[in-house]
Image (tube, grey):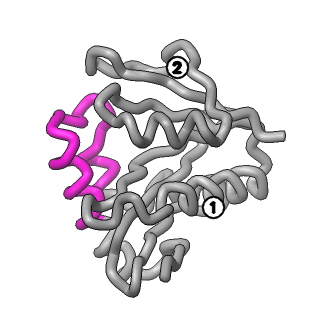
Amino acid sequence: MIDIIHVYSDEHLKIIRELFLEYNNWLGIDLKFQNFHEEYANLPGDYSEPDGTLILILHDDLPAACAALRKFSDGICELKRMYVRQKFRGKGIGNKILITLIDDARSKGYNKIRLDTLPFMKEAISLYRSFGFLEIEPYRYNPVEGALYFELELK
């Protein structure tokens, strides 16, 4: 069973911190250009209500994934830190994350969701495209060669 938890408690924040570190290590790049260490230290930070969302996904009561939204600019939010642990991939968790965050973005009054991703994340890129995300020009700095940028218009 898949449960999606909107994170407010210290207990859930502790698990989110573990998942964020795991995500950072899995990427294999230094996220200093995104101020990752400051973001991590200040969690939930920009992912706090009312403009943001931070979710923890449990699969059979085990921490399986995380994702977040934060305000980018008026009417636009950014999807960040979407990560599904290896052993939980292929179970529909990515779909549930996007459904939840798209609903959250709409309820917060956002008109668009943006994200950036890396070319080796083929499954994630396919998932984003299947939800209607379209590739756009870079909207922020990312030094990783081949970084891709996507946007979804919320209707």
Amino acid type, mark 1: Thr
Q: Nearer the viewer, residue 143 or 146?
A: 146
Helix, strand or loop at disc 1? helix
Name the residue rendered at 37%, 34% in the picture: 122
| Residue 20 within the magenta-colored segment of the rendering | yes
Amino acid type, mark 2: Tyr
| 23 horizontally vs 132: left or right | left
Name the residue rendered at 22%, 47% in the picture: 24
Q: Quadrant of residue 80?
A: top left
Residue at the right extreme, as displayed: 155
| 116 horizontally vs 111: left or right | left
Identify the disc placed on residue 100.
Answer: 1
Q: Nearer the viewer, residue 120 or 155?
A: 120
| Residue 100 within the magenta-colored segment of the rendering | no
Number of residues whose C-alpha sits closer than 10 Å to that of mark 2, classed few (under 14), some (14–19) or many (20 or more)? few
Location of the C terminus by quadrant is top right
Helix, strand or loop at disc 2? loop
| 19 horizontally vs 76: left or right | left
Name the residue rendered at 77%, 40% in the picture: 154
What residue sits right under mark 2 in the picture?
Answer: 139
**Residues shaded magenta:** 17-40
Q: Quadrant of residue 14?
A: bottom left
Q: Is residue 26 above or below residue 119?
A: below
Chain-order first, disc 2 or disc 1: 1
Gap in angstroms between the C-alphas marked 2 and 1:
24 Å
Identify the disc placed on residue 32.
Answer: none
Residue at the front extreme, as displayed: 90
Residue 69 in percent (x, y) is at: 55, 50
- Tell whether label 1 touches label 2 (CB within 8 Å): no
Number of residues whose C-alpha sits closer than 10 Å to that of mark 1, classed few (under 14), some (14–19) or many (20 or more)? some
Q: Is residue 154 above or below residue 106?
A: above
